[in-house]
Amino acid sequence: MSAQQLLRLVAMCLLASGLIARLAAADLFDEIYARGRPIDATLKTLTAQFSETTESPLLIQPLVSQGTIAVVRPLRVAMQYSAPDRRSVIIDRGRLRIVWPSRGIDRTMPIGSTEKRIQQYFVGTSPSQLRSHFDIAARVASDRPGTWFVAMTPKRKQIAAGVSQLDLWIGTDTVLLAAMRMVFPSGETTLLEFSKVHLNPAIADSAFQPATP
């Protein structure tokens, strides 16, 4: 798995966990932060459906996938892809496991150091600390009614080497992540869109079992 894909998955783990409420810019920060704090404080689990669209200069057409995500905070995540092909991406106990039966892939790798970097830049930081890492601009979204749009551009070379732009759409009613777009230095972009989000459901261990043929 490429560094881009790994960063995408770890970022997904944090953003889907509700931590996005901390990432607003100065002009909208007070409102979003104040409304998001109670959700963030009580959020322990989350499930949702997602659609993932990847575009690249190397692709003739975008790649579109669908599936479900299950999150147990702080960092236990299962992304189960159902279309166009069954596969699983599981983050658990500092390890990332990718299982793609049709391609004969079953790979596990440690990601503890990456998790620590994400924690450093995103979790438990103050607004001023976030702005020391990113240029952040926020506005009411014109393309997705009922959402705020937050654009984050890394200031630090270490972050920019992995992702050159992070765009977020946050529901104005729910203060939850509606969509996230990552732009990578290679020119590849990945858009994740979420629906049927449920907060604090019971999640069985079977949700973290990898896909089978």
Image: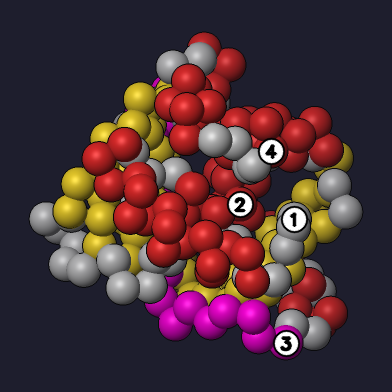
- Residue named by callout 4: 119
Q: What's the residue at 32%, 66% (across, down)? A: 171
C-alpha span from label 1 to label 4: 10 Å
- Mark 1 falls on what kind of element? loop
**Amino acid at circle 3:** Ala
**Amino acid at circle 4:** Gln
Label 2 neighbourhood size at 10 Å, few (<14), some (14-19), many (20+)? many
Where the N terminus falls, by quadrant?
top right
Where the C terminus falls, by quadrant?
bottom right
- Mark 4 falls on what kind of element? helix
- Mark 2 falls on what kind of element? helix
Q: What's the residue at 85%, 47% (across, down)? A: 94
Work out whether mark 1 precedes mark 2 in sequence or the reverse, and give the earlier one: 2
Q: Which segment is the magenta one?
A: 183-202
The percent coordinates of residue 49 (x first, y second) are: 49, 76
Q: What's the residue at 63%, 70% (across, down)? A: 43
C-alpha span from label 2 to label 3: 19 Å
Do the CB atoms of the residues marked 1 and 2 lie less than 8 Å apart? yes
C-alpha span from label 3 to label 1: 16 Å
Specify the quadrant of the image occupied by residue 59: top left
- Residue named by callout 1: 75
Work out whether mark 4 precedes mark 2 in sequence or the reverse, and give the earlier one: 2
**Amino acid at circle 1:** Leu
